[in-house]
Structures are given as C-alpha cells and as structure tokens.
Amino acid sequence: MKIVYINTVCSTGSTGKITTSLYHLSKSAGHEPYIAYGRGTAASELNSYKIGNLLDFGAHVLSNFFRGNSGFASLKVTKKFILWLEEIQPDLIHLHNIHGFYINIPLLFDYIKRKQIPVVWTLHDCWPITGQCAFFEYSGCEKWKKECYSCPVYRSDYPYSLFKDNSKKNYYIKKETFTNIPKMIIVTPSHWMAFLIKESFLKEYPVITIPNGIDLNIFSPNTNNVSSKVPLSQNPLDNNKRILLGVANVWDKRKGLEYFKELADTLDSNYHIVLIGVSKKQQKKLGKQYPNRITAITRTTNQKELAEWYRNAYAFINPTLEDNFPTTNLEALACGTPVITFNTGGSPEALTSSCGIVVEKGNIKKLKEAILSLENSTEITSSTCRIRSLIYDKDRVFEPYLELYNRIL
C-alpha cells in the first residue's frame, strides 16, 4: 500500500514527530510510505517531497496578511505537488496539519475527490472547522458551529490576518472543500476534539480517537536508556532549586506565558521557572524582568536534551488555555515528572490523580496551591508518572492506524 503523509513539517515539533513515527510504523508493516511537507527539512532516509520553497511561503504569508486567505494561496507549488502525486499514485493519503502557508487546499481536495483517494485525516487543532483560527474555546467563540464572521481574534491568533477579516468566506470555502469526500475518516487525539467535530460541518464522517504517542526510550527517567547523557545547556541552577518547567513551540497567549510570570512574582525563591521554546525577543524581555526567577531558552530540536530538562524538573506546568492532546504532558510523565495543567481542551485527558493535578482554568491561586501540594503528596511519584506514560508508547498507541488503513480501503 502506498501511503502519502502530508504535514506542515517533517520530524520537528509534535506533529512532525507523530507523522514520522507513523511513516516508520507503516514501513515496518510492509507498506510504501512517503512524507510531503511544507517547511524545514527531512531526514535523508525518508521518502519525502518538499512542497514549495521560502519564496512561496513568504508570498502565502503576505497573501494572508492582506487578504485573510490562509490555505488558499501556493497555487503553483500545489499544482507541481499534484503532478508528483500522479507519479506516486497513492492508495491512501493521511493528512495532518494542512495549514501553515504551504499548500492550496481547494486544489488538493479537488484532486482527492476526482481520484477518489481514501483519506485519513488526523486533526491536531480546530483550523479545519473554522473560518480563521486554530483554537477558539479560550476566546469563548462558538460561531464555527453555524457560520464564522466578524472573527474576534483574526489579528491576534494564528494564522494571523492583519488587514482583513475573511473568516466568513473562508468558512464556506472550507465547508464545501472538506465535505462530500467519498472515503474519509477523521482521527482526533482527544475525546474533546472528537466532541467538537460532531458539532461541526465534518460531522458526516466517522470519527475515531487515537491518542498521541511518544518515544519512551528517549523520554525516560533513566538516562541509561539513551545513548548519552546530554548536559543541560544554559543551566544556571544549583541543586537546591525546584525547577518548574514549561515547554512550547510558540509561547503565545494561549500557551499561558502570563501565568508563569505570576508564579515568578508569588512563589518563594526555592522555585525557579525554566521556559523552553521562547523567541529571542521573549528571552531578552524575560531576562530583564525576571533575571533570578525565570530561565528562558529558545527552542531546542535535541530531544535528548529536552528529556534531561524534564527529568530535572520538580513539576511540568502546562497552563494552556486550550490544547488538543499535548505531547509535552506525555513527555514529562515518561520522564517521571508530574504534570499540572488547566482543565482545558484535551490537556487533562492523559492525567490521573497518581501522576498529575488538574486546575480550574485561569485560576492562578489554585495553580500555586497545586504546586505547593506536591511537597506532601504520597500518591504522585516518579514511578506512578512513568507507569501512566507507558500506555502512550508510540510503537503501540499508533497501531490502530494500521487497522484503520485496511478498513478504509
């Protein structure tokens, strides 16, 4: 079976890692996989195709800035990509994130419908069911259920459209584009997302929940499970500090950066906050505002180093205001580190009382109390966190996808 995986990135970020894991899983099962991606690079051993280039990416971004049409540019590179698909003749296409300024979605789906290619679509966020945004719960917007218009976050939330709110037009184009596909199954990593899909214009399709998975050999409490112990770069801390760790690809408002600032203002000096994934601008600003309370580190692609940060953390704090099924929670648990998160989206779904604490959304007082409560907790241990993570082993949790491929064909 020839399977083409399509995602914004390949191997990096949570969706890139998931896509690559599925590639290797399907290959080991005897299939012929390919990965098509829009940004970054791909490992040489992968059968891959890069859609577009930096020039097209920039043009797509500018088109969205001025016209509000993310997903509706990149005509030339998409036509070229479809010619490549014609050469491959895939038996199945597995979609992941198709937003990210690299592909023209009407062209892609017109090809899928004409060729009647079976599709599995794993939804990592809400972008496919809205006219603009990737997440909407934290802003309290429910227009997506019937019709997007007058988007409240089109200028502030990804994918940013600075000069035009085109949410209404985009909503109806997506609705027409994404419906009436002969063979398509939707996969959601969380039950929360599955519920949303059933209220959207994608409700005509079967929806299956398959959680995200991680590499338990890299993310482990025992450094002997990796080839070498990577030293903690930029580590200014002494052994007496309790590290409160936060990790994100982009530290925007939705990820809860402001709550870490409030924790830095209220917790005593026994605690030190480490934030990984900040921009250069954020790193400089946090360094000036909280020189002795917050260590800000730009994004790392070294998973072994990231695992070392998880292992050295007292707790992983995820004050996200909305997320699907964060792999960061899983990575922390696998390293034996408890997770504290807000009761938002699918973030609490991986947790039990023996490995983490779920806090009321936006309640900084409860968040602080949860952190302090870990000191006297006997139920939450490194061992119980690791045990909980075992059910998210990527080599096992993704196996239902193989059954799904056979089922849809």
Image: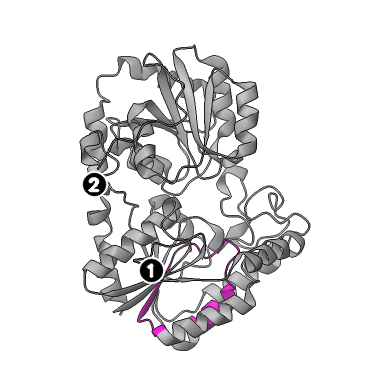
Picture quarter containing residue 119?
bottom left
Callout 2 amino acid: Ile
Name the image quarter holding the N terminus.
Answer: bottom left
Residue depicted at 72% across the width and 65% down the height: 63
Residue 381 colored in magenta in the image: no
Q: Which residues are magenta?
A: 88-112
Residue depicted at 21% across the width and 40% down the height: 225
Identify residue for label 2: 391
Between residues 84 and 156, which one lies in front from this camera angle?
84
Q: How was the colour assigned to the protein in this rendering?
A: one colour
Q: Which of labels 1 and 2 is toward the front?
A: 2
Q: Is disc 2 surrounded by few (<14), some (14 to 19) or many (20+) residues within 10 Å?
A: some
Name the image quarter holding the C terminus.
Answer: bottom left
Helix, strand or loop at label 2? It is: helix
State the mark number for residue 60.
none
Residue 97 colored in magenta in the image: yes
Between residues 197 and 6, which one lies in front from this camera angle?
6
State the mark number for residue 206.
1
Callout 1 amino acid: Pro
Residue depicted at 52% across the width and 63% down the height: 200
> How many angstroms separate mark 1 from mark 2 (CA)?
24 Å
